[in-house]
Image: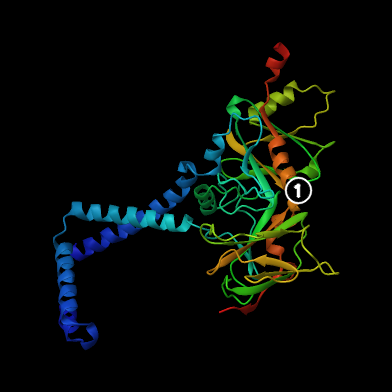
Amino acid sequence: MTSRGRFLLATATGLVLAGLVHIGAVLLIPRLSEADALSRARTGETLDHAMPVYTLATGDTPSPPEAWLPIPDPAVAVGICAYDLADGPMRVSARTGPLMLSLAVHGRRGAFYAVTDQAAVRGALDLVVLTRAQYDEALANADENDVTRDVRIVAPDAKGYVVVRVIAALPSQRPAANTAVQAVSCTVDVPAEDKAGG
Amino acid sequence: MKAADMVAPARPEAGNAGVRTIGARIAAVARDGVRRASTVSLVLYALALGAGIGLATADYATRGGYPFGGVAVGAWTAWPRTGSVGADPYARAVNARRGEIPLAVGEGMLLTAAQDDEGQTLDATCTYSIAGITPPARAWTVTVAGRGPRDPARTIVREGYTSTEILRDRDGRFVITLSPEVQAGNWLAMPRASGPVRLALRLYDTPVAASAGTLDRTSLPAITRTGCAA
C-alpha cells in the first residue's frame, strides 16, 4: 500500500471512530452528567416535602437565584421529590386547591407518568411509585374490603424524581402556588409487615 | 501532484510571494510527513481524529436547544416528546446538560418560536403582534426570553402572559404586542435592548401533546412584524 493510501485509510478509520465516539458520548451524557435534574434532586432526598426548584417572584421579592431551570415559566412554581425505591415505595400526597397542580414521575429515561389535579378524589391526590416486586407485594397484602384511593405506578428504574408544578394564573396567586408546591409531601411508605408488627 | 505544484506558483491571484512560500513549505512538510509516517503514528492520528471530531460534534449537538424532534407548525415549533420516555438520545442529553425538567406528555407541551411568520428572526428592536387563538388547554402561558444571562440593569415589567391574565376580544381571540415601546392592550416588553429573542408558548393539561402532528397554523397565534425602530 502506498503511503498516501495508508494515510487515507487512517483518516477514514478516524472518521468512523469519530462517529462511534459521537454516539457513545451522546448516550453517556445523561448518565455522567452532574448538572441534570436527577443528580440535583438527590440533595433534597431526605426531605419530607417537595424541594422547591423554582419559586415564583412575589411582590418585590424576586425569584431566588438558586433556581436551576434554564428558562423557567414565570407563572409556574416547580418542586421536586427524589425517590430511591430501594428504601421502599414512595408516596406523594397532594391536596388540591384552587390552583392547577400536576405531578409527573420521571425515571432515568424521561417522564413515564403524569397526572393533574383533575384526577383527585375528594380533594386528595395520592401517588405511590413502586417497583414491580413492591407492586405485587402490595397487591398480595391488600385487604379486599379496603378501597384504596392510591394511584399505583410501577417505575422502570429504582431511582427517579417526581415533579410538582403549580400554575399561578394571576400574580396574586403566586404566594399560594409557592405554598402549594411545598405542601406536597413525599414520604417512603412503610412496608406492610413493619406496620403489622409495630 | 507534481504538475499541481508547478501550476500553483504561476497563478497570479494566489496572493503575495511570502504567503505562497509558507503555504508551499507547509504542504511539502505535510506530504513528507505522510510519506514517512510510521504505522504507530498513523494509528495515533486516527485515534486523535476520532476522539477530537467525535467529542466536538457531540458537544455541539447537545449544547443549547434540542437539535431535532420538533414539529414545525407555522412560525412555532412544538416539542411534544422531549420529556417522555420516547425522547430521542439528543433531547435527553440536552436536558441532562442544562438541568432542564421538560413537560411530560400528560402535563403539557412546549412550543417555541425564534422567527416570525415570514421567517425573519425575532429581533429585540422590532415590534411584533402575536394574535389569534391557542389549541385547547386548561391553561397556557406565553413568555419571551433572550439568549444568555439576563441584564441585571434592566427592570423586567413582565416576562409573559397567562391565559387568565390576558385581555381578549369579544370572540375570544387575543393580541399580544411584543415591543420595546409601551403599547396599549397586552404589552409584552422586550427582555433586552438588542439581539434575537425567543417566544415560548406552554400549554398545560392539553390533549394536543399526544397528537402534535395534527396541529395546523390557524390553531396557533400568528407572529407578525409590525415595525422596526432601526
Position of residue B70 measured from the top left corner of the image (x, y, whole percent): 60, 61
Classify the position of the C terminus of chain A by image quarter: top right
Query: Front-most of A34 and B165?
Result: B165
Crowding at dot 1, Cα within 10 Å, few <14 / some 14-19 / many 20+, comes out as some
User: What kind of element bears circle 1?
Assistant: helix
- Name the residue located 47 percent from the left edge and 48 percent from the top edge: A27
| Quadrant that contains the N terminus of chain A | bottom left
Whether residue A141 appears in this view of the structure is yes
* Badge count: 1
Residue B13 vs residue B182, the one in the foreground: B182
Residue at the extreme top of the image, as rendered: A197
When asked about the image quadrant of residue A101, the answer is top right
With B212 as the anchor, is B123 left or right in this view?
left
Query: What residue sits 35% from the left and 57% below the top?
Result: B53
Q: Chain of mark 1?
A: A
Q: Could you say where residue B87 lies in the image, as x and y percent from the top left?
A: 58, 51
Query: x and y percent of residue B97 in the render?
Result: 49, 49
Which residue, given by chain and number where applicable, does mark 1 sit on?
A173
Residue B147 vs residue A163: left or right?
Answer: left
Residue at the spot 76% in from the left edge and 55% down from the top edge: B139
Q: Is residue A9 above or below residue B5?
A: above
Residue A73 in picture, x, y percent from top left:
65, 53
Q: Which quadrant holds residue B224?
A: bottom right
| Among the 4 quarters of the image, the one containing residue B208 | bottom right
User: In the displayed structure, does residue A48 sit left or right of residue B32?
Assistant: right
Specify whether A27 is left or right of B171. left
Q: Residue at x 16, y 81 (%)?
A: B17
Of B84 and A116, nearer the camera is: A116
What amino acid type should be assigned to the residue bearing mark 1? Gln
